Image (cartoon, helix red, strand yellow):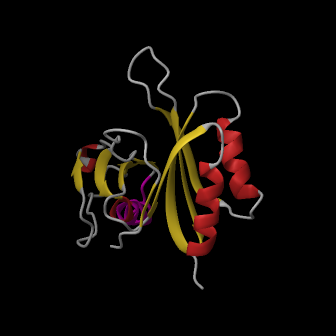
Amino acid sequence: MDDERWVVFARGANRPGTVAAVTAVFSTRGVSFDSLSTSPLSTGDDDGGGLVTVTFRTTDRRRRELVRAVERLAAVSGVVVRRSADLGVRAAAAVHLPRDVPFRPPPQAGVSWSGRAELGEPVLVEGPLVDVELVVAAARAAGATSTALVIEPPPAPSGPEPVAVVNADR
């Protein structure tokens, strides 16, 4: 069976050991990350916890095992997992092209952007992760001097934190 690319969002306590516990679930099962990021969930002085976002490749069966193990962690309060090609997985990227290189996203990429690369400004690109990654790859091929990409957190739940597996395809 072929490996698929997945994105896991794990909401958890903002305390030492939370990220280590999540990463241990993957490493003890022989699954490497494509990317890992963390971000706070609080919007004020209160500790709203944090979000660990991981992209990785594995089979659907192994993905289910990983999610069950992350859900069981005491420091984790909720898990959302989606295929990376799911158009609901949103991302933003900044690309900085040389002054003489125009910004041209691939025609099939459903993204919006702002900035004027021809003036030496970085360009901010937003859209589905799969399309933003396509634009970043094209910008790198065109000579981008720097790029940065962030996966946007899923919408906040409106009620008790559910554990959801969304298997929507592109």
Left or right: residue 33 versus residue 116 is: right
Extreme residue in the front direction: 160
Left or right: residue 115 versus residue 31 is: left
Residue 48 position in % (x across, y down): 47, 26
| Residue at image point 69% right, 28% down | 16
Reply above or below: 15 against 156: above
Extreme residue in the top direction: 45
Which of the pair 55/98 is nearer the observer?
Answer: 55
| Residue at image point 43% right, 25% down | 42
Q: What is the quadrant of the N terminus in the image?
A: bottom right
Query: In the image, which residues are magenta?
Result: 133-144
Residue 103 position in % (x across, y down): 27, 57
Main secondary structure of the magenta stretch:
helix
Q: Is residue 87 magenta?
A: no
Q: Is residue 140 magenta?
A: yes
Left or right: residue 104 versus residue 85 is: left
In the rendered image, is residue 59 in sight? no
In the rendered image, is residue 30 in sight? yes
Reply above or below: 109 against 148: below
Q: What is the quadrant of the C terminus in the image?
A: bottom left
Residue 93 position in % (x across, y down): 37, 49
Residue 66 position in % (x across, y down): 63, 60
